[in-house]
Image: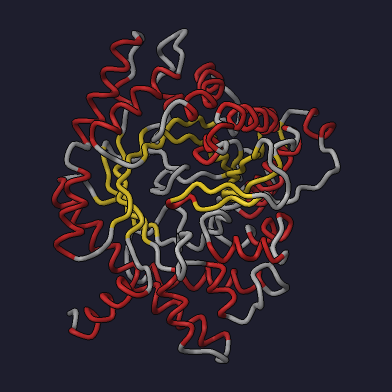
Amino acid sequence: MINKQEVLETIHMIQDQKLDIRTITMGISLRDCADSDEQRLCQKIYDKITRSAENLVKTGEDIELEFGIPIINKRISVTPIAIVAEACQGLDYFSVAQVMEKAACEVGVNFIGGFTALVHKGYTPGDRALIKAIPRALCETERVCSSVNLATSRAGINMDAVAEMGRIIKETAFLSKDRGCIGCAKLVVFANAPEDNPFMAGAFHGIGEPDKVINVGVSGPGAVKAALEQVRGASMDEVAETIKKKAFKVTRMGQLVAKEASRRLNVPFGIVDLSLAPTPAVGDSVAHILEEMGIESCGAPGTTAALALLNDAVKKGGVMASSHVGGLSGAFIPVSEDAGMIRAVERGSLNIEKLEAMTCVCSVGLDMIAVPGDTPAETLSAIIADEAAIGVVNHKTTAVRVIPLLGKKVGEKVSYGGLLGDAIVMRVSPFSSKDFIARGGRIPAPLSSLRN
């Protein structure tokens, strides 16, 4: 039974510690929309999305008002479009992106994910056509998000796709250069992509998911930091216990919202993603949690160990609060979206190499990182390959969301506003990976993949 003290504590976390529900995401299967005729295909997709999600935004707003819990975004994820549209020969996949944008605008959601291809073991014609359409799709729409999964622990790494995605990122940056290359902020390259992730830009509705589902992503870095302020100087055992208890409370709030949205929309409840998703707002930073543990500035020696403790404690606390934890779940380190990370880059304590080490123990990977606009496509591909290798060998999700800021040099900044924050250009190694990327083929799966 919930007591008065717990209610007051939750109110305090919401009002003073930036606690919120980051997203309610409705996953929608489009497998029944496949058609060989382009016009029928697009109409089916539009009708399925608008019919399924017509009450999503209003339901989220009603829950916000009635429970007093901020819900920042309402989003949709759909079946990977490379699968849905493949029966339509000769299709320009950009037309599907336009339909997704139109449907998202009609129902009022903030983003729609699923302009996606799964190519970890190779391409189909639909995969090739979709990937080719990504730059235009992301640069001529506002709400469409895209992802490509090019590696798994069972299949290894598709190095042909790695090479191509470096070029796709460069082209996307070029087409959106008049808006700070923002198209790249809506593109994620994955290893071991989860099928139930509610967070953008990597959300898609996996082929093993039901026809419709409600997934919720929670946040709460500020609440965790506030809890740690009460145990300054304590042992790591007490730090871990403190984080677990706070993660439990944060996840319970997410579970409440998820089940209420599920009931009102008559859509099955899927998962709660209990990730600590930061924002550029002061007091809502994962970097500040690490610094509260005793790291002078995020990126200093000890940062990776502190992040490992944080990630593990968050998961342990969360799984006690919900029987259906999924998605990414843990701690995010998107540089531009975290005020503490931005400050650490400005101080010089945080660089790409240290971030790569941190991704070995956190939830995702190199996220929202700006690099100089003249960075070669092969270097971007090599960064993707490194991050994919971490995911494949460690049987975890890793990802790259990198933004080559054309015309910008190390230390310069672009402000996107909102959740995307301020992208500060980080130094990239000047040494070439061109010959490595040119080899192509596949990096085989590790021996640990043979688990049957």
Query: In this view of the protein, can residue 375 be seen by the observer?
Result: yes
Query: In this view of the protein, can residue 451 be seen by the observer?
Result: no
Q: Which of the 4 image quadrants contains residue 335?
A: bottom right
Q: Quadrant of the N terminus?
A: bottom left
Q: Nearer the viewer, residue 12 or 83?
A: 12
Residue at 44%, 36% in the rendered image: 145
Q: Which of the 4 image quadrants contains residue 88?
A: top left
Q: Is residue 5 left or right of residue 338?
A: left
Q: Which of the 4 image quadrants contains residue 250?
A: bottom left
Q: How is the image coloured?
A: secondary structure
Residue 254 picture location, percent across and down = 30, 62
Residue at 34%, 75% in the rendered image: 16
Residue 329 picture location, percent across and down = 45, 59
Q: Nearer the viewer, residue 178 or 37?
A: 178
- Considering only vertical position in the picture, is 42 above or below 317? above
Q: Is residue 190 left or right of residue 82?
A: right
Residue 380 picture location, percent across and down = 70, 38
Residue 125 picture location, percent across and down = 53, 16
Q: Is residue 279 left or right of residue 408?
A: left
- Considering only vertical position in the picture, is 30 above or below 192? above
Residue at 65%, 77% in the rendered image: 295
Q: Is residue 5 left or right of residue 158?
A: left
- Considering only vertical position in the picture, is 162 above or below 417? above
The mark total stands at: 0
Residue at 55%, 45% in the rendered image: 192
